[in-house]
Image (spheres, grey):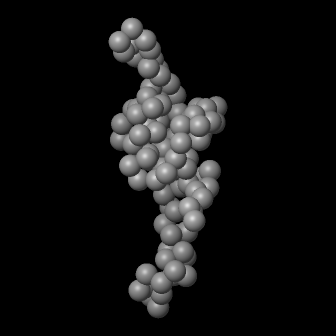
Amino acid sequence: MAIQISSELLDGCVLGLLSTNDYYGYALTQKMQESISVSESTMYPVLRRLKKNNLLSTYDEPYQGRNRRYYKITAEGKRQYQMIQVEWQEFKKGIDKMLGDGKADE
């Protein structure tokens, strides 16, 4: 069984990676795949949605005769990322409690 990741959590993962570095789409997908299972067909709609919501901006850089579209987190995206981090900590604490991380009695 593969655990499904919610769109809000996926947004947070993308914003988290982009909070430290700009990435072009394929490189961002590869970076995500180092930690979770996600396909390119999942990533590009997420990137479009985040851009539409002004959480990301894009710019193009030439590479071997073609352009690569890079994604960059916006100030609004950084604020959203901080909110997701807070919500994630609360969610994680509840799940850890139920799944038994050894801290259920705290």
Question: Residue at (57%, 34%) from the top-left corner?
Answer: 44
Quadrant containing the C terminus is bottom left
* Residue found farthest to the bottom: 105
Question: Residue at (52%, 80%) from the top-left corner?
Answer: 99
Q: Position of residue 37 (x, y in %)?
A: 49, 51
Question: Residue at (39%, 42%) from the top-left corner?
Answer: 31
* Residue found farthest to the front: 1
The part of the image, by quadrant, that contains residue 66 is top left
Name the residue nearer the viewer: 3 or 74: 3
Question: In this rendering, would 30 be left or right of 44?
Answer: left
* Residue found farthest to the top: 65
Q: Position of residue 7 (x, y in %)?
A: 62, 50
Name the residue nearer the viewer: 87 or 46: 46
Q: Position of residue 10 (x, y in %)?
A: 55, 50
Q: Position of residue 19 (x, y in %)?
A: 41, 42
Question: Residue at (42%, 85%) from the top-left corner?
Answer: 103
Name the residue nearer the viewer: 20 or 25: 25
Q: Is residue 55 visible?
A: no
